């Protein structure tokens, strides 16, 4: 398998996609990432590759989705390593623009917003996060749209449950010609949901972080009430619970735990914020 | 010239555009309107027709861009007459969806916003207006996008100066593959800028409304200071001035009148709000 072509400009990406479509590519798949790829991403890249003639992975650390005091500056950037990993998965194109390419006029005047639905749960502690993510993904969808007749699919992990739901809403509400394909959470053998931020965890903290998955599993099995589950997470050393709730996966409304609902948890483990979720 | 094809569904419009493009149409032009077409619209429709193989006019009274207490319910709706007028201009397609077709899930959860730039000038008295207009136009751009290789142009009158600027920003900020083509203001022989809302004016009010154009002209000719111009508008019977300012047309920042700046005026004439503008 050859190396992916790395495009760093919008025009270059459009040109590369147009060429492949003209050359017979009959479907286009996108995996949007911020790089620092781990096994979770590669699992999704593999699906993107398998399900589409043309497989594109974007690698862009999007300043709009980081709040003040968050880890924008220190977020891991390792493009060369990412490209090597994606080469092994047979990805065709990597889109790796810099900030000035994506935001040539600085912070956008016109942007995409999720209003109230983006200011609860993760949005409550990360104001502006979802609007930033929606804006950059909307741009990617519009930049890459291969035109009528060429199916276009975008892949999002189920780990970021609120993000996935909002992306699905965006596609409906703004008529993007793309199909969102959700991908199940990839976990370590011990159950920790894979995340770029896991590399911030000490081995000890990684051990404490397992309480999230264990508690969700117990909740899903009906062994704990919601309140007991919250207490169990909060009792873990070096873990500070933000929220543990069950929601209607269709609209994120808070509901009691019941089959078909989705349990969402967010907690800091040491200084590192982690999220996880599980269908009840 | 034949009657335009009237599409009432998103799928129908996409299909009609795809067919015409497959049949050889090499460019696509869109004039977005809320109907109640007047000579100003028809002037733009003519340009849209002349400059594109496929000319589309959308007719949709967009609830999102009306505030509480505004004239959404009473806004004139006269599709049959509009289609007849557009037939005379040789327009190919009219897109006339109902509200449930454009917003099948009700008010969008995810939408387009212009933030601060949309809450000054017109936005100050019409909160949410520009976000509503940007959202529906973004949807139209995405729905209609003919694909790479087919130039897509959208036509906006210069009368709505702030709207035009925000649409241009939206295209840059969200990467819509469309070129915005501004169209000069069309005026009555007496100078009144054409607007659907002019039909609310009594003959007497229409006379008073001429003060807007006369004052802009005097300001542009250097015969009045900004303050004198404001007093002149405010002194007209049955006219209540909202704002009369000069701005940098690149970013809407308030500046002193000078060559190259844009004078913007908004006033109520009787109960009807009118706007106008002129390059200095």
Image: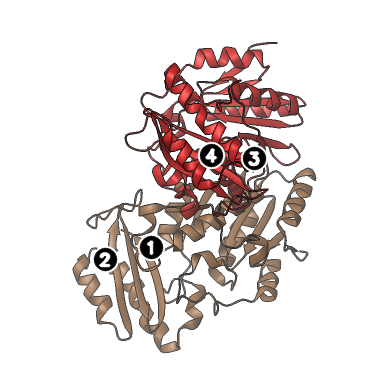
Chain colours: A red, B brown
For the residues labelled 2 and 3, the Cα–Cα distance comes to: 75 Å
Q: Residues within 10 Å of mark 2 (few under 14, many from 20)?
A: many
* Residue position marked by numbered label 1 in the rendering: B123
Position of residue A233 in the picture relative to residue B236 (left or right): right
Marks 3 and 4 sit apart, C-alpha to C-alpha, by: 40 Å
The answer to whether marks 3 and 1 sit on the same chain is no
| Numbered circle sitting on residue A139 | 4
Looking at the rendered structure, the secondary structure element under dot 4 is helix
Indicate the position of residue B250 as horizontal and vertical percent values: 36, 48
- Mark 3 vs mark 4, foreground winner is 3
How far apart in space, not on screen, are marks 3 and 1 (Cα)? Answer: 52 Å
Q: Residue A221 — which label?
A: 3
Dot 1 and dot 4 residues touching (CB under 8 Å): no
Q: Secondary structure at mark 3?
A: loop
Q: Position of residue B105 (x, y in %)?
A: 63, 60
Q: Is residue A217 above or below residue A118?
A: above
Q: Nearer the viewer, mark 4 or mark 2?
A: 4
Give the tally of numbered discs.
4
Q: Is residue A195 above or below residue A89?
A: below
Q: Is residue A128 above or below residue A7?
A: below
Q: How far is mark 4 from mark 2, CA to CA?
A: 41 Å
Of callouts 2 and 1, the N-terminal one: 1
Q: Chain of mark 4?
A: A
**In the displayed structure image, the side of residue A255 where residue B87 appears, left or right:** right
State the residue in front, B224 or A197: A197
Quadrant of the rendering where the C terminus of chain B is positioned: bottom left
Considering the image in quadrants, where does the N terminus of chain B appear? Answer: bottom right
Q: Tell me the tag on residue B219.
A: 2
Which is more toward the observer, B122 or A99? A99
Asked if residue A168 can be seen in this view, the reply is: yes
Depth check, front residue: A90 or B75: A90
**Looking at the image, is A136 positioned above or below residue B280?**
above
């Amino acid at each position: 398998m050859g190396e992916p072509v790395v495009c760093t400009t919008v025009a270059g990406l459009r040109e590369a996609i147009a060429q492949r479509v003209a050359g017979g590519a009959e479907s286009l798949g996108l995996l949007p990432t911020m790089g620092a790829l781990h096994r979770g991403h590669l699992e999704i890249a593999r699906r993107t590759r398998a399900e589409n003639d043309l497989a594109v992975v974007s690698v862009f650390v999007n300043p709009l989705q980081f709040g003040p005091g968050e880890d924008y500056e220190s977020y891991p950037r390792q493009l060369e390593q990412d490209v090597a990993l994606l080469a092994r998965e047979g990805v065709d194109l990597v889109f790796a623009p810099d900030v000035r390419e994506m935001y040539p006029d600085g912070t956008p005047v016109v942007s995409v917003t999720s209003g109230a639905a983006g200011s609860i749960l993760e949005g409550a502690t990360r104001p502006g996060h979802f609007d930033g993510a929606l804006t950059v993904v909307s741009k990617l969808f519009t930049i890459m749209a291969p035109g009528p007749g060429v199916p276009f699919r975008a892949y999002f992990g189920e780990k970021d449950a609120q993000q996935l739901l909002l992306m699905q809403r965006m596609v409906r509400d703004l008529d993007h010609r793309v199909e969102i394909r959700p991908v199940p959470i990839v976990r370590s053998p011990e159950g920790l949901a894979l995340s770029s931020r896991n590399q911030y965890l000490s081995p000890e903290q990684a051990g404490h972080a397992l309480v999230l998955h264990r508690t969700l599993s117990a909740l899903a099995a009906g062994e704990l009430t919601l309140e007991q589950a919250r207490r169990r997470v909060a009792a873990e050393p070096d873990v500070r619970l933000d929220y543990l709730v069950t929601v209607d996966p269709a609209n994120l409304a808070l509901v009691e735990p019941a089959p078909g609902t989705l349990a969402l948890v967010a907690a800091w483990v040491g200084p590192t914020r982690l999220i996880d979720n599980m269908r009840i």
